[in-house]
């Protein structure tokens, strides 16, 4: 099917090909069909340069300039302001923008609270549905539903749930005598909880999927052995299950922390472009500074700060994914 | 267990302890998942006056699903989203096949740095790249007198930022797991590298490409951030367009918004369910195996 379609003169280097040896193990002369076809990477590399690497470099540059709606037409000549934005962003809340500090606090609180809440929920579901349960197949599929519903739909749904007085949250609380029907969720201090609850509902299946994938790699013999040694329930979990899924679970937790931290859609659709301080997370604040008040330099400076905050979880993530260790 | 342990017969079939308890717990999870979804469906079946004020509709108002198409240009938004998401999926998967193949089969300088950077892009906040991308597009527009901002091309190009690194990573892992002997035999028989890629590697890599297609499709379908800045009214996507049910009307049409939300979630849910097994395997292997 391949041969003969386009016969090529076999070059001297090709004849020495050792069967079973990977082509890359041998240095190939230029032009040999066994040489690495780097041109196959060129389109991807060129594209990545334009849409990833170049924008990152430009973001750093913009963060040191006074780029705004008036200077955007000639952005290369925007006044250089040095670290001004980094200092400005630490200033107390103004009328239009929360300070960087408020946003960092909101972002960290949001991503940590959510991750802490979803981990036991996700692991619990995975343990439950890894074992025998009637109707397991149906349950396994159903659990994924919140995860596959688009984030913007999720955000709209929870915005309605948390509507003051009429939303499901207030109606349920009133019916169960847990609180007033006039509880405000979308403004004021409760907004953080509204955001966390919405994201917990949407994100826990990620921990569940990853844990379930990890659990399915554990051979049943290990459980039989543990069972014969008299281990039961929690002890089996702590001493057999957890050590074996630690890698997968750790990766899932780090990844989900990163995802919550970078989540723009959920807070934006739930709270709009003038959110309460408690949910004015970094991505939202950066967006407002860049595209609502057109203070591009400040927005870029804040996103550089966001990138540096992400550095620690990112390094943990890359180590957990064990990239570069093998081959 | 002491002395009693050896006397216990070894169970051939694992008995399910607390079968009823486990089932109840699973039902609890199901209720947790379904409660908001059922609420969404119930509100979508209410009439405009009571929508959002009550939980259970007094009278089922099916008309919502017909009315919603007139309030905002829902059809156009859905079509734009389908087109953009499908294009993103195809372009990312095809480009990533070439790059993933090279990464899987060859050792070259900076190979590991490249692989690390593929995963690292996952941690970059999208909002960091949005403004510079906008600036780059404006510069290219001025230099070449073409339109990028507001076109399908511009949006698809932008989604490569996150779709392409993941796709290259996943396909490189996938191709590395395929045997290389057939490729080598074909090369020795005189096929070119492109022939091999097209006729040997590609057919074998299709399952991996299905996963990268779906992942990229969902990434594009779910985006609001880039689409809110880089689309024009003619290319507006569903994620941005849905919000007009609240913005363009004085009275918020919650029933229509919920109905339109359900409709816009369907392609994502269906697509995911179809390839669920592959995605789950891909998630686990793509991020775990080097």
Image (cartoon, coloured by chain):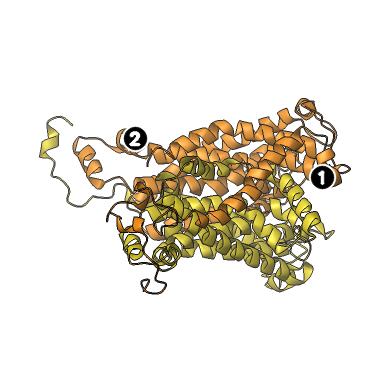
Q: Is residue B18 above or below residue B214?
A: above
Left or right: residue A201 versus residue B16 is: right
Name the residue tied to disc 2: A243
Q: Where residue B65 sits in the image (x, y, percent)?
A: 68, 71
Can you tell which mark lies on residue B76?
none
Q: Where residue B113 sits in the image (x, y, percent)?
A: 50, 40
Q: Residue at x 73, y 36 (%)?
A: A61
Residue toward you, B262 or A14: A14
Q: Is residue B15 above or below residue A97?
A: below
Q: Secondary structure at mark 2?
A: helix
Name the residue tied to disc 1: A292
Q: Residue at x 60, y 45 (%)?
A: A199
Q: Earlier in the sequence, mark 1 or mark 2?
A: 2
**Residue B82 falls in which quadrant of the image?**
bottom right
Residue toward you, A325 or B124: A325
Q: Residue A97, can we see it?
A: yes
Q: Is residue B37 above or below residue A261?
A: below
Q: Which chain is yellow?
A: B
């Amino acid at each position: 099917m391949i041969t003969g379609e386009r016969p090529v003169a076999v070059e001297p280097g090709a004849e020495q090909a050792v069967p079973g040896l990977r082509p890359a193990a041998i240095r190939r002369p230029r032009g040999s069909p066994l040489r690495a076809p780097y041109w196959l990477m060129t389109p991807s590399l060129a594209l990545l340069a334009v849409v990833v690497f170049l924008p990152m470099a430009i973001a750093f540059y913009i963060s040191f300039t006074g780029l705004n709606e008036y200077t955007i037409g000639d952005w290369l000549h925007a006044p250089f302001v040095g670290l001004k934005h980094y200092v400005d962003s630490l200033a107390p809340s103004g009328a239009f923008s929360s300070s960087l500090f408020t946003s960092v606090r909101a972002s960290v609180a949001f991503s940590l609270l959510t991750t802490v809440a979803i981990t036991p929920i996700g692991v619990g579901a995975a343990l439950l549905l890894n074992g025998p349960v009637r109707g397991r197949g149906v349950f396994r599929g159903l659990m994924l539903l919140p995860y596959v519903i688009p984030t913007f739909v999720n955000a709209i749904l929870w915005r309605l749930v948390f509507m003051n007085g009429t939303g499901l949250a207030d109606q349920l609380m009133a019916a169960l005598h847990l609180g007033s029907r006039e509880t405000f969720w979308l403004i004021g201090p409760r907004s953080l909880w509204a955001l966390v609850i919405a994201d917990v509902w949407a994100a826990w299946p990620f921990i569940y999927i990853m844990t379930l994938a990890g659990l399915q790699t554990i051979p049943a013999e290990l459980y039989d052995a543990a069972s014969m040694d008299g281990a039961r329930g929690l002890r089996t979990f702590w001493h057999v299950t957890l050590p074996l899924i630690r890698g997968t679970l750790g990766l899932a937790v780090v990844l989900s922390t990163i995802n919550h931290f970078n989540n723009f859609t959920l807070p934006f659709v739930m709270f709009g472009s003038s959110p309460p301080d408690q949910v004015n997370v970094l991505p939202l604040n950066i967006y407002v500074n860049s595209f609502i008040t057109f203070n591009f330099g400040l927005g870029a400076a804040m996103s550089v700060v966001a990138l540096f905050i992400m550095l620690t979880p990112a390094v943990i993530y890359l180590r957990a994914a064990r990239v570069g260790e093998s081959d | 267990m002491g002395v009693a342990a050896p006397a216990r017969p070894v169970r051939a079939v694992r008995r399910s302890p607390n079968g009823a308890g486990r089932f109840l717990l699973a039902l609890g999870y199901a209720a947790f998942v379904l409660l908001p979804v059922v609420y969404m469906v119930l509100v979508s079946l209410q009439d405009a006056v009571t929508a959002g004020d009550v939980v259970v509709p007094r009278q089922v108002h099916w008309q919502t699903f017909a009315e919603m198409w007139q309030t905002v240009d829902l059809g156009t938004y859905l079509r734009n989203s389908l087109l953009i998401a499908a294009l993103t999926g195809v372009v990312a998967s095809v480009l990533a096949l070439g790059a993933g193949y090279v990464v899987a089969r060859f050792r070259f300088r900076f190979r590991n740095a490249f692989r690390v950077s593929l995963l690292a892009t996952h941690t970059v906040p999208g909002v960091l790249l949005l403004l510079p991308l906008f600036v780059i597009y404006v510069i290219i527009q001025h230099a070449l007198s073409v339109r990028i901002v507001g076109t399908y091309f511009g949006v698809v190009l932008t989604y490569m930022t996150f779709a392409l690194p993941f796709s290259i990573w996943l396909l490189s892992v996938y191709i590395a797991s395929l045997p290389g002997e057939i490729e080598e035999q074909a090369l020795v028989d005189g096929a070119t590298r492109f022939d091999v890629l097209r006729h040997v590697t590609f057919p074998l890599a299709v399952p991996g490409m299905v996963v990268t297609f779906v992942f990229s499709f969902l990434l594009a379908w779910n985006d609001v951030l880039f689409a809110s800045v880089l689309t024009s009214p003619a290319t507006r996507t569903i994620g941005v367009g849905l919000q007009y049910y609240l913005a363009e009307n004085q009275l918020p049409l919650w029933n229509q918004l919920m109905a339109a939300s359900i409709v816009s979630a369907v392609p994502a849910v269906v697509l995911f369910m179809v390839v669920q097994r592959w995605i789950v395997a891909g998630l686990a292997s793509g991020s775990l195996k080097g």
